[in-house]
Image (spheres, helix red, strand yellow):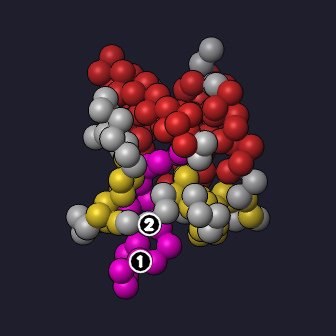
Amino acid sequence: MAIAEPIMLAILEHASDSFLNQAGEQVYTAQYAAYGSTGQLFALSEGQYPPYLNSATPYVYEYIEVPSGNPYEAVTWQGQVLNSSPENFVKIAFAFLLAIYRSSYGLLLVNNLGKLSSSDGFDEGILQNGQVFNAVSDNTNIMIMLACAYAVTTK
């Protein structure tokens, strides 16, 4: 399994090596393949999640197993599997499009998730069931700024 955020951050911060670059490609490919087979967008990562299981700290880790391609799974920070709609994170949409892969899939993600902004910054994301999670997070907005900086400084 591979969680997108630490891999994407390493690439965006120019701290990656060939292993992390390959892992990033696998994370991207797995999510794009899931979109291709289901028609649903995937911009999975880790982050804030609408309250679940009466948790005081709603935080999840989402992934698709690489390279097996087993279905999506989310695990709470307590290690419980969450049987709910996956959240598509705005920060991953920007990292995929602006920064690293500059693909038509990344553009589709940003066109769907990039509108989740407020005067305080970008919201966390949207669940595949349509529920917008309109919480502004420093982690999300920092990663979006890193993606922009990476896009400007790389070919």
Residue furthest toward the bottom?
54
Would you name the residue on which mark 1 appears? 52
Identify which residue is drawn at 38% across, 66% down: 83
Identify which residue is drawn at 59% across, 19% down: 154
User: Is residue 49 found inside the magenta-colored segment of the image?
Assistant: yes
* Quarter occupied by the C terminus: top right
Relative depth, front residue between 145 and 58: 58
Question: What residue range appears in magenta?
Answer: 41-60
Instruction: Say which quarter of the image contains residue 137.
Output: bottom right
Q: Is residue 23 visible?
A: yes
Q: Circle 1 sits in a helix, a strand or a loop, which is it?
A: loop
Relative depth, front residue between 64 and 120: 64
Q: Circle 2 sits in a helix, a strand or a loop, which is it?
A: loop
> From the viewer's perspective, is 139 left or right of 125?
left
> From the viewer's perspective, is 130 left or right of 73?
right
Identify which residue is drawn at 43% across, 33% down: 30
- Mark found first going from the N terminus, 2 or 1: 1
Identify which residue is drawn at 55% across, 53% down: 88
Q: Amino acid at mark 1?
A: Tyr
Crowd rating for badge 2 (residues with CA inside 10 Å; few <14, some 14–19, many 20+): few
Rendered location of residue 76, percent (x, y): 32, 65
Instruction: Say which quarter of the image contains residue 115.
Output: bottom right
Crowd rating for badge 1 (residues with CA inside 10 Å; few <14, some 14–19, many 20+): few
The answer to whether the residue labelled 2 contacts the one labelled 1, judged by CB atoms less than 8 Å apart, is yes
Q: Is residue 15 above or below residue 128?
A: above
* Quarter occupied by the N terminus: top left
Badge number at residue 84 = 2
> From the viewer's perspective, is 3 left or right of 114?
left
